[in-house]
Image: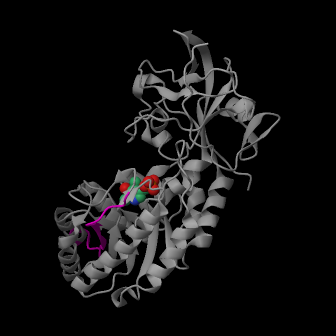
Amino acid sequence: MSGQKIKPMGPIPPGFTAENGMLLIGGCGAAALADEAGTPLFVYDAGLVRTRIAALRAVLPDGVGLHYAIKANPFPPLLALMADMVDGFDIASKGELAVAQQAGMVPEHISFAGPGKRDDELDAALRAGVTINLESEGEAARALALAERLAVRPRLAVRVNPDFELKGSGMRMGGGAKPFGVDADRAGALARQVIAAGAEWCGWHIFAGSQALDADAIIAAQAQTVALAARLSDEVGAAPPLVNLGGGFGVPYFAGDEPLDVGTIGAALVETLAARPAILAPSTFALELGRYLVAPAGVYLTRVIDVKTSQGERYAVVDGGLHHQLAASGNFGTVVRRNYPLAIANRFGAPVADEPVTVVGCLCTPLDRLGEAVALPPVAPGDLIAVFLAGAYGASASPSAFLGHGPAPELLVDEG
Ligand SMILES: *Cc1c(COP(=O)(O)O)cnc(C)c1O
């Protein structure tokens, strides 16, 4: 007995079941999926994404658009599915512009944010006719000059660095000095300038933060966002066609995290919008969400290569690691390493062993831990470990070139 203390894991997202002890993803057994594509691999369940979007739509006010921030997961088959289910894609590079268009999203419903857009990216966006969310006065000047050279009327929105923050969010993107957007006290002047230059002014983009699990904090930020949009529009003297209210809806990754109560948020947004200032009467509104829509639908499957003991502590060494699932290793924007939900896919729901096990990846660095001192059923070489919440910021947000193992295959499983 090592006496090693068990460290808790986050909750396994709802919707996963097993058949004869084998985890099912989109109705397919994990072992069959692993045999088909090889391990490690990412599997995304289309049905879970559909259900999630439908449930969210059911609580949002009518007419509030749902945009998908594709940086969360730009896997082309998933994007093609999303293109039919959401009202717009938010992109942040020329590469994302290309995959967004290939997925079938029309340019009128694509908006391009992100600091440091190069001239060739602005040029591609202008030619395609997508909305550019301006991040600075300098970017506005470059976009206007390029548009004139191309003889196109640019579609420009102003991204505002809000003068408030989304409280409790994992990544704050507003409140204080930020590289994103134009400070609220200069945003009105910039909008007036782009209108005067003859551009099609598309409205405001106000994104206050990410990964919030506190409904009250999101409700407060949405109310402040609507108030700020109204104040700025009054300064401009024009109604914004679109107010992008940002997003920030989080998912429960860790022990003690509770799912976000989107019903409360939707009900509050109905009231906020019903009571909006007159200048926003003709405006439309949108939310832009990334991880909330896709994270719970993804599973990273990795096979146990070796089981070993060091000074009384047990290790399961798997064929995957942080080069595919950086976030689960605790090295993507988290301060303290905590355990994502894990399971043994081929012993799903079996009783846990007496001793905890630490699941480490195959990379030669102590950073490569997928689960620390977790309570799992007895584990043996050949077992498949499932790392949940792998549908966002997994494959595309991990250093897959690190140590030469290469990227993991991705599968979208769609039962229809
Ligand atoms: C990253 C990002 C998102 C998506 O964030 P999630 O936390 O995945 O919802 C949305 N909008 C902007 C501007 C972003 O930078």
Q: Identify the residue at the far bottom of this view.
A: 278
Q: Magenta region: which residues?
A: 148-167
Q: Position of residue 280 (x, y in %)?
A: 37, 85
Q: Could you tell me which quadrant the C terminus lies in?
A: bottom right
Whether 232 is drawn above or below 100: the answer is below
Colour style of the rendered protein structure:
one colour
Q: Quadrant of residue 224?
A: bottom left
The part of the image, by quadrant, that contains residue 333 is top left
Left or right relative to 68: residue 414: right
- Residue nearest the viewer, comparing 212 with 204: 212
Residue extending furthest toward the top: 311
Q: Residue 219, relative to residue 373: is it above or below? A: below
Q: In this rendering, is residue 315 above or below 171?
A: above
- Horizontally, residue 200 falls left or right of residue 149, namely right
Number of callouts in the render? 0
Query: Could you say where residue 70 lies in the image, as x and y percent from the top left?
Result: 46, 55
Quarter-of-image position of residue 36: top right
Q: Quadrant of the N terminus?
A: top right
Does 33 appear above or below 134? above
Question: Can you give x and y, in whole percent of width and height, for residue 353 in the image?
Answer: 69, 23
Q: Is residue 245 visible?
A: no
Figure quarter occupied by ligand 1:
bottom left
In front of the other: 228 or 199: 228
> What residue is rendered at 27% in x and 58% in y?
180
In this rendered view, identify the residue nearer to me: 93 or 25: 25
- In x, y percent, where is residue 17? 75, 44
Residue 344 at least partly seen: yes
Whether 202 is among the magenta residues is: no
